[in-house]
Image (cartoon, helix red, strand yellow):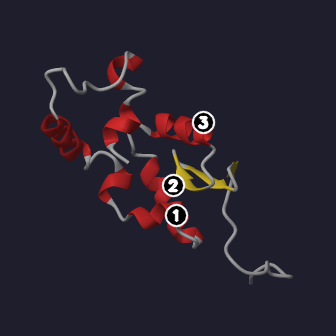
Amino acid sequence: MRLTTLLDTVNQCGSGRWPTGGSTATTQDRDRLDELVDDLIPCRSHDPELWFAEQTVHVERAKALCRTCPVVAECLAGAIDRAEPWGVWGGQVFVSGEVVATKRGRGRPRKNPAA
């Protein structure tokens, strides 16, 4: 997903979409903007698979990285609006389109607590 698509809702305090077509901004300008903010958006600068991991440790790492993101609230709102089926969005875990507190790993749960 292009960053400009994600930031459409926060552009100039929600005043509209990023300039397109007949405006003075070109595709090259938008690409340059994307490059400049890649380091600010964790999901753009880290392995994308981290946000869709199965292992709890990786999911928690993605959630921690989300906490440093400047558009975390907008990302979460967008994921809720789109009813994302799974993954980490806006620092929250989605499973079957619902936000869950923690993601349970694969396999059967233990009968007895881990020692």
Badge number at residue 63? 2
Disc 3 to disc 2: CB gap under 8 Å: no
- What kind of residue is marked 1? Phe
Q: Position of residue 86 (x, y in %)?
A: 61, 57
Q: Earlier in the sequence, mark 2 or mark 1?
A: 1
Taking the spot 36% from the left edge, 52% from the top edge, the residue there is 42
Q: Which tag is nearer the camera, tag 3 or tag 2?
A: 3
Q: Residues within 10 Å of mark 1 (few under 14, many from 20)?
A: some
Q: Quadrant of residue 25?
A: top left
Who is closer to the viewer here, 15 or 89?
15
Q: Which tag is nearer the camera, tag 2 or tag 1?
A: 1
Residue 9 sits above or below residue 80 on the image:
above
Label 3 residue SS: helix
Badge number at residue 113? none
Q: Report whether 25 appears left or right of 95.
A: left
| Residue on which disc 3 sits | 81
Q: Residues within 10 Å of mark 3 (few under 14, many from 20)?
A: few
Taking the spot 25% from the left edge, 27% from the top edge, the residue there is 20
- What kind of residue is marked 3? Asp
Who is closer to the viewer here, 46 or 7?
7
For the residues labelled 3 and 1, the Cα–Cα distance comes to 19 Å
| Residue on which disc 1 sits | 52
For the residues labelled 3 and 2, the Cα–Cα distance comes to 19 Å
Q: Report whether 71 appears left or right of 78.
A: left
